[in-house]
Amino acid sequence: MTATTLGADWALDWMERARAVVSANRIELIELDRAIGDGDHGENMDRGFTAVGAKLAEATPSAPGEVLKTVATTLMSTVGGAAGPLYGTAFLRGAKAADGALDAAGVAAVLEAAVEGIQARGKAEAGEKTMVDAWLPAAQAARSAAEGGSGPVEALRAAADAAAAGAEATEPMVARKGRASYLGDRSAGHRDPGAQSSALLLAAAAEAAEAL
């Protein structure tokens, strides 16, 4: 039976899957970042989510918000470059928006809060070849699913699919923010590494929900 709400068990499984998928895609993320950045995104993300896994192994959270807050503080202290503050802010804002177990509207609220945090921290808009291009369509898809009567599992799947499409759509874009923007038109033709890691994380969230 499909879950009608997502609790702490889902959030913990999400983070375990996130750790695994970031580790498995570490080299790909390094290579994407090497093309248009400084090449450390995969290493930084792998270090951060390994630390998240260790921290959560010691925790006994009772709600998703508690998990997300731990993720936020751990990423902020362990992930270098721009990704640490951006992801940390996303998860911290998401944690504040998570009120108990999440229904579809709760999922949408968490993702919307995460996007707002990323944009507040990074000053980026859609179409500028950043992680916003994955998170914003994900949040919009989750909200549409919730308003259409779908449950949280379906809302997360819609979000994950939208994030994957959003990450792919960054390939032809010219970067307007961050280190990649220094390349100007030469940044076109490469997928944004932050958008790609975002898509991987949101896919892990959907898979954890579907496994309940």
Image: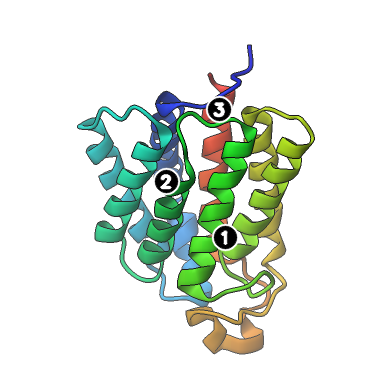
Which residue is pictured at 62% across the width and 70% down the height? 190
Location of residue 101 in the rendering, given as x and y in whole percent from the top left corner? 48, 28
Which mark is on residue 195? 1
Mark 3: give few (<14), some (14-19) or many (20+) Cα within 10 Å.
Answer: many
The foreground one among 178 and 153 is: 153
What is the three-letter code of the residue carrying label 2? Answer: Ala
Location of residue 50 in the rendering, given as x and y in whole percent from the top left corner? 29, 45
Q: Earlier in the sequence, mark 3 or mark 2?
A: 2
Which residue is pictured at 61% across the width and 21% down the height? 4
49 lies left or right of 36: left
The foreground one among 194 and 143 is: 143
Q: Secondary structure at mark 3?
A: helix
Location of residue 49 in the rendering, given as x and y in whole percent from the top left corner? 34, 47
Which residue corresponds to mark 3?
209
Residue 32 seen = no
Task: Kindly report the distance in space between the C-alpha atoms of the residues bearing marks 3 and 2.
Answer: 17 Å
Q: Secondary structure at mark 1?
A: helix
Between label 3 and label 1, give the one nearer the viewer.
3
Q: Mark 3 near mark 1, Cβ–Cβ under 8 Å?
A: no
Residue found farthest to the right: 148
Task: Kindly report the distance in space between the C-alpha atoms of the residues bearing marks 2 and 1.
Answer: 21 Å
Which residue is pictured at 53% across the width and 54% down the height? 113
Q: Earlier in the sequence, mark 2 or mark 1?
A: 2
Which mark is on residue 95? 2
Between label 3 and label 2, give the one nearer the viewer.
2
Q: Earlier in the sequence, mark 3 or mark 1?
A: 1
Location of residue 71 in the rendering, given as x and y in whole percent from the top left corner? 34, 46
What is the three-letter code of the residue carrying label 3? Answer: Ala
What is the three-letter code of the residue carrying label 1? Answer: Ala
Task: Kindly report the distance in space between the C-alpha atoms of the residues bearing marks 3 and 1.
Answer: 21 Å
The quadrant the N terminus occupies is top right
